[in-house]
Amino acid sequence: MAMNYPILTILIFLPLAGALALVPFWRRERWAKGIAMGCAVVELALAGRLLFAAAGLPAASGAPGGYFLWEDHVWIERFGIRYTLGMDGISLLMVALTAFITLLAMLVSWRGIRERVPLHYLMLLVMESGIMGVFLAQDLFLFYLFWEVMLIPMFFLIGIWGHGRRIYSAVKFFIYTMAGSLLMLLAIIGIYLIHGARGGNYTFALHDLIGTPLDPGTALWLFAAFLFAFAIKVPVFPLHTWLPDAHTDAPTAGSVILAGLLLKTGAYGLIRFGYPLFPTAAKAVTPLLLTLAVIGIVYGSWVAYAQEDMKRLVAYSSVGHMGFVALGIAVWSPVALSGAVLQMVNHGITTGALFALVGMLDERTDTREISAYGGLWGKVPLLAFFFLLFSMASAGLPGLNNFVGEFLILAGAFRVTPVAVVIAFVGIVLPLIYTVRLVQQLLFVEERRPLTLPDLSLREGAILAVLALTAVYLGVHPAPLLGLLKVSVALLTGGLP
Amino acid sequence: MTVTELWTVMPLLIVACGSVLVLLIGAVAPGRHLTTVAVTTCLGAALWTVQFPPVAAAPQLGVALTSLARIFTVLFALAGAATLLLSRDFNERRGIRGEEYPATILFALFGMAVLAAATTLLTLFLGLEALTFAFYILVAMDTDSNRAAEAGLKYLLLGAISAAFLAFGIALIYAATGTLEIVPAMAGAARSVAGRPLALAGWGLILAGAAFKISLVPAHLWTPDVYQGGPPPVVAFLSTGSKGAAVLFLIALLQPAGLIPALHTPLWWLALLSMAVGNLAALRQQSIKRLLAYSSIAQMGYVALALLTGSREGYGAAAFYVVLYTAMNLSAFGAIASLSGKDDLETIEEYRGLGYARPFTAGVLALALFALAGIPPTAGFMGKFFIFAAALRGGEPLLAVLGILTAAVSVYFYLRVVVNLYLSPALAETTANRPTPAEIVPLAATSLVILVLGIYPAPLMAIIEAALN
């Protein structure tokens, strides 16, 4: 497949163009929806095409190892800022996930959003642009720009179409992430200046900055700033407190994107920027990150057990699952890192599906209290079946997707820190407990209140079926994805034990 | 007067003649067309300044149309044109009539242009005082409003004190160095400090006076009252043109030899206090104009941080920030002016739901607020980035970190307004005014500047850096 057009730029700016194209159709909701959906479909088609073609693509010329697509232009020469995009295996998986989850988010909000419909889809498209940019930027300045751009649409998504204390949650989300990223900005300028002062080459290019010799104290401070910004997004315990509020109060599409994509940007940032830029500092901090990851795993699952609100339960379960990802990154071995990236994809799919299901129930009955439901297995068998499937996937049932990622992470980590793995293993058991309780209360206990609710519509069924097939496929046959990751992960972990 | 001299002062002549012309026409045929005449004057001055060939000086008159002067003259002229357009319908709604309004705006612009082109301390001072004098009148122009009268009086009293500081400081520098030419005087002042405290006292007084003009804490106390009391279009011009001119004043004085080392610490504290007090005090404001007043105090703190570095990069960052700050504050106060009908929309609460009821104006306001908060892809982010990069490189890491922390705090109060515009339940009915064409044009232009400079700042940055060489 010849790539003689700037496909990465198209991936980033097509949704933005779509968002602008929506504006003339402000009063025609169906048109607006159609345009947005069209953009999302094209994005997914582009990403899918890359996914299938990637294995055969040669290394891009002028790019560092592992990158098969590369675009590089001068942007602000005075400061050595470049417009550099690159795609390796990790970026590709994240881009594909972004296209997939964004389309999913649009589909699940097809009926749920009734007010200011065009604005909602506009926000989703702008968000997609921002996230794509985060996953493709290879210049620290450019990355930071996209990193901030993601915030604004999510702020509006939660704040305008959310539930409950939506304004509080939206502002909390915004301030929290902003505080982290401003410190990261200082660290970015810091490493830029240190690198420039050494050789006179002032640049923000990631792959030039990697390997900058830093004295340990400075490196630790700079890494701390990066870690802080990324850990908030992941979220790593104890920086997770924005997450339950934001997830719970967000509209379904917002929750799906938050859990499916925004959390991944934090982990991705650590993998792409944090660890490669500051390997020694990262090594020094590893025990701390390991500890926090394990605490996150146990704590998230523990608190999830106590939740009465389904959405909050899924939100806290995310804290636990992302703890696994953090564990895989902290270990930084090829197996664990592959597991972490895979787990990012898996978590995006299962949690996205669970938020979609909760959203569907909420749309039908206007409540997310677990105790309001019961006996769904008999009443809405199709919905109940999918609920069971994704709950089991989320709990890590072998044969379904999450199991693979968690297994790889634990297998990779066992050699390095057996103790952490033993504790994290509790984190595999705890989800089983709260999942079984959730499923039992929702599906199998006798109905507590007479609820009239229809089963899945064709649209909902189709969404869930695609998600379920993906989950099963990734659970049974993850080899192609692991193959995509192999080179990048090997290159990344080469420098570290 | 030689032809070169005539060409050099042509922008000043255009503005001055325009001002007189407006007064004359107003005496014969008052009406809305006076705005058209005044706007044409501004644009004419800007156009002349842009197309004029390089290097031109009129040493006899104490002015020179340097590249930097040129950039800022154009900026001030465009800001003046935007202000005039924003004022036209606003003044009609408020019953502010008469030719004196556009004429005084032009007179303020004249002061700014003189200041931008000044090569001696005397013309510099005259320019600064001419524009301040015009603003004494403009702030109190709405004769029906007690608040405006109060604001005008406060501005006048404190302005007079600061003028005294500046004049005495300049006199001391003259006494210490024996010249009024900026470059030798300031270079001499920097050299002579060790022996004579006269120059140090002079610089110190100038800094104090300038701190008042750009409202650095603790010389900021007039700002919230004046911003709240003055008519929004006037405040738009006051907070951009007059502050930009004062920053330019400082850059002109700093450029020859930098800051006297002994004054580094005071300016360090001025910058820190402005960033901290401005951003923290804004958190508690209920009035949007007071909120923006404190925000502008903090914004000037960032500029002071850039000036503190004493490097050309720092001055460049400050000058760049002034340009985009002009766009941001014109947008913000312009939107407020456009939304205000008979009375100002005062409290933040009154803006609830306007994002949907008045999408254009509210969008402009929201964009300006995001830019002031420094969120990409707006110009505010680029400006802050240049400033903090210059500060880190110029050896001010501590102040840069503290500044970033206060900027993180500031996000909250800017967001509060956006929350009211878009997220809070809308008011049952709003008295907010619909934008008129004369208001849409400048607001769209400033918004465009905010976006374009945020995505592609390189050309402007290059022009400014070249001008500073």
Image (cartoon, rainbow, N blue to C red):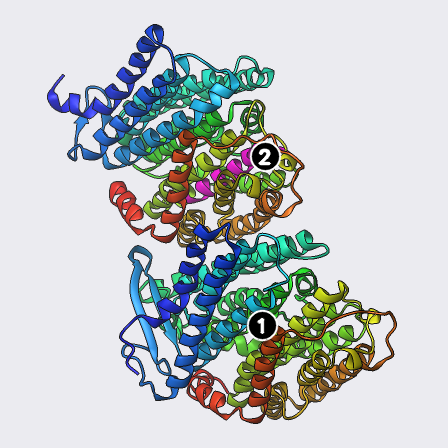
Q: Which residues are magenta?
A: B286-306
Which secondary structure lies at badge 1? helix
Q: Chain of mark 1?
A: A
Res A260 label = 1
Q: Nearer the viewer, residue A170 or B97?
A: B97
Relative to B30, say whether B72 is above or below: below
Residue A262 vs residue B263: left or right? right
The residue sitting at 56% across, 15% down in the picture is B149
Residue B116 picture quarter: top left
Q: Quick check: A78 above or below A263?
A: above
Q: Nearer the viewer, residue A378 or B224?
A: A378
| Left or right placement of residue B199 versus residue A162 in this view | left
Verify whether residue B296 appears in magenta. Answer: yes
Q: Which residue is mark 2?
A: B288
- As drawn, the residue found furthest toward the left would be B3
Place residue B277 in its image quadrant: top right
